[in-house]
Each structure stands twice: as C-alpha cells, then as structure tokens.
Image: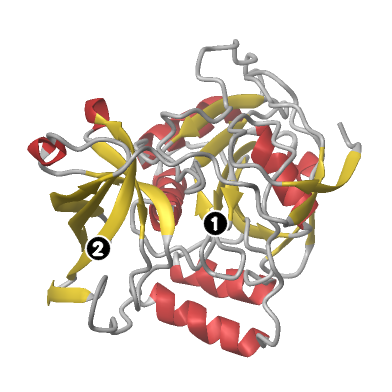
C-alpha cells in the first residue's frame, strides 16, 4: 500500500477512490508567509472583498447576505436533493471558476433544465449558507465530452479504499504548532477527521465543515460525563498555502482547543493518500488558478481501536450526530463497525464538487 507511482497523468473520467491520475498542485511562487496570513484573515473575516462590476459581480447586499449574478454550464441535475451541479464562471472578488453542486431553494427553477444547458442564476450567500435561485436557460448544448487530460502530474501512492472496520494506516503530518503528528499515536482515542482548504469561501463547503467541528467540540467539552479520549483533526489539501502559521490563525478564529482539535498539513503524497482512502477527491480545474480547488467532502470517525467507525459524505450531517458518534467510538470496548453500504468511495451522486472536464 506504500508503493509509490511517480508522475502519473490526471484524467477526470476516473471517479473511484483509487485514482492514479490527477492534476498537479502548482507551487505559488513569491508568496511570503506574512502575506498569506493576511490574506487568510481577510477571508475569515467573511470573504467580503468588493466584487468587480460586470459579469459575475455582486449585485447587492443585505446585511450579512450577498448576491451574485453568475453564468455556468449544467453538468448534473439531482432533483431528489434539489441540487444542481454547475461549472460556473469566476465570481470576481469572491470565488474562482469551479464545478460544484448548489442547493436550489425553489425546485420549480429546475424545470426544463438539463445537463449541457448554459444558464444564468442568482447565487445568494450568507455567513452560514448558500444557494442559487432564478435559474434561466441561456442556450442548450450537447453534454460536454471528456476533455484531453492536461499535461500535469502529481506524485501519488497506490492505496486501497478503506471500509468500515479497517485499521487506519499510520499517516504523518505537521500540526498548526509545527509539531510532528503520527495518527497511529492516537490509538486509544476516538478520532474525527475532515478535509478543507482555508481559502474555500462557499459557506456550505469547507466553512461548514469547520463550523460543524467547532460545534461538535463545544458539545463534547460541555457534556457532563463525556469521555475525554477524543481528538479532532482538520487536514488541508492546499499545503503550499496552508502553512502551520496559516492553520494556527484559522484554528484560533474557529475557537479550536489545541488539546482536542488540531489542524494538519504535510507532504501532498500523504494528504492525497489518506484522502483517497476515504473517497475525498480534490484537484485544480485550471492549474494556473492557485486558489481554485474543486473538491468533494468527507468526514471520518476512527474508533479507540484505530479502526474506521463511520464515514460521513456531504455536509448534511449535524454536529450533535458527530459528537454522539465520537462518544460511541471512544468506548474502550467499542465493537468494530460492520461493513455497510455507505462505502467511502466517491460517486456521481456525491455532493462534493466534480471536475468540469467531463
């Protein structure tokens, strides 16, 4: 499982956990740590830079609510979830061009919309939520064919997806304090793991994962007679930007207690390997856009015996449910989780972002 593959090409067609082809994550040149930290503080203050007028610009604000008029191409309709996956244009002053799912507040907005359609829509963003509305078809196109893979590479490890009950391999990272972390050292504790990058602005993606962990931490710390053998880990998949200093600031903003919640960075090979074992996919649709990372979502609970206890897809789970699961997993006599159908690999119905090169 530790065998290395060197320089394997990326291909957006492969959506299972054992991906061996993906985009490189370019190194941001000339970016001083001090500047990075200031940029992060700006993002954490609410991602409120003024948008450039024109296509995709902010069209109005109402307190903590911002609206943007956006265009994009529909890739997938999920009527059972009132969601649509759209490859949207860059939203100046807010978000790079990405392909991601959006909640649709009015299901009727999806009437007559199909994959391949070019649409315009209004994106509404609050401090904790985001959705789209007023979807208007601009033109109809054939669904996009698979594009030729770009000439980019990432060094990866061959790994197998982990099922419930499987032991978590030893992974080595660096925390926000600059300390070396070996996940194997946390056997005896229940461990919660999620994945983010700090420059992710959309509230129902990375910010929601961090808010959920904050609320779960609060519940566990305040609960009478709650176990103390638990720890939360937030792993970045943007290690070039998310240095320990940046992660420390991010953790402080989110009220992290370092005794129970750590933020990890490290070698991209390690980050990619643990992510893929749980079906977490991330890539840069345009390698020249350093801050534009498309990704899906995964949150994992490891029991006190070091085994995979639960895998949570999407962002619909509640902090209370995570806290309850961690309490179960912290039991020294915890029984191994039986294999269930919620396999950790990604699927076309995954709520996470999906490549725009399809």
Q: What is the quadrant of the N terminus in the image?
A: top right
Rendered residue at 25%/73% (across/down): 55
According to the picture, the residue beneath numbered tag 1 turns out to be: 285
Rendered residue at 52%/70% (across/down): 250
Rendered residue at 54%/75% (across/down): 249
Number of marks present in the image shown? 2
Q: State whether residue 175 is above or below residue 223.
A: below
Find residue 59 and report its image quarter: bottom left
Q: Position of residue 135 (x, y in %)?
A: 15, 50
Density class for disc 1 (Cα within 10 Å; few <14, some 14-19, many ≥20) is: many
Under circle 1, the secondary element is: loop
Rendered residue at 63%/72% (across/down): 241
Find residue 101 and report its image quarter: top left
Q: Position of residue 142 (x, y in %)?
A: 35, 38
Under circle 2, the secondary element is: strand
Density class for disc 2 (Cα within 10 Å; few <14, some 14-19, many ≥20) is: many
Is any part of residue 331 visible from this angle? Answer: no
Q: State whether residue 344 is above or below residue 335.
A: below
According to the picture, the residue beneath numbered tag 2 turns out to be: 70
Is any part of residue 262 visible from this angle? Answer: yes
Rendered image: mark on residue 82:
none
């Amino acid at each position: 499982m530790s065998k290395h593959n060197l320089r394997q090409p990326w291909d957006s067609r492969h959506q299972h956990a054992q991906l061996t082809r993906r985009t490189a994550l370019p190194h941001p040149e000339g970016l001083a740590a001090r500047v990075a930290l200031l940029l992060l503080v700006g993002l954490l203050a609410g991602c409120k830079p003024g948008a450039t007028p024109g296509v995709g610009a902010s069209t109005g604000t109402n307190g903590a609510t911002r609206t943007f008029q956006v265009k994009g191409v529909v890739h997938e309709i999920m009527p059972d979830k009132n969601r649509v996956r759209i490859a949207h244009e860059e939203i100046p002053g807010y978000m790079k061009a990405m392909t991601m799912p959006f909640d649709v507040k009015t299901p009727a907005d999806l009437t007559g919309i199909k994959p391949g359609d070019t649409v315009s829509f209004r994106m509404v963003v609050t401090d904790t939520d985001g959705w789209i509305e007023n979807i208007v078809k601009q033109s109809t196109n054939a669904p996009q064919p698979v594009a030729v893979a770009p000439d980019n590479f990432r060094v990866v490890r061959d790994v197998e997806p982990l099922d419930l009950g499987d032991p978590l391999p030893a992974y080595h990272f660096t925390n926000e304090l600059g300390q070396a972390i070996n996940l194997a050292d946390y056997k005896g504790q229940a461990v919660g793991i999620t994945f983010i990058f700090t420059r992710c602005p959309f509230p129902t993606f990375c910010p929601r994962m961090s808010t959920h962990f904050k609320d779960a931490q609060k519940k566990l710390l305040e609960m009478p007679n709650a176990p103390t053998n638990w720890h939360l880990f937030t792993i970045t998949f943007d290690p070039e930007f998310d240095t320990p200093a940046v992660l420390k600031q991010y953790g402080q903003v989110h009220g992290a207690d370092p005794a129970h919640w750590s933020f990890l960075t490290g070698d991209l090979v390690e980050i990619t390997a643990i992510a893929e074992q749980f079906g977490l996919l991330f890539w840069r649709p345009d390698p020249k856009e350093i801050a534009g990372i498309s990704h899906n979502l995964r949150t994992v609970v490891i029991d006190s015996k070091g085994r995979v206890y639960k895998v949570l897809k999407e962002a619909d789970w509640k902090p209370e449910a995570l806290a309850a699961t961690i309490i179960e997993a912290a039991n020294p006599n915890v029984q191994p989780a039986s294999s269930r159908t919620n396999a950790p690999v990604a699927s076309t119905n995954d709520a996470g972002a999906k490549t725009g090169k399809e």
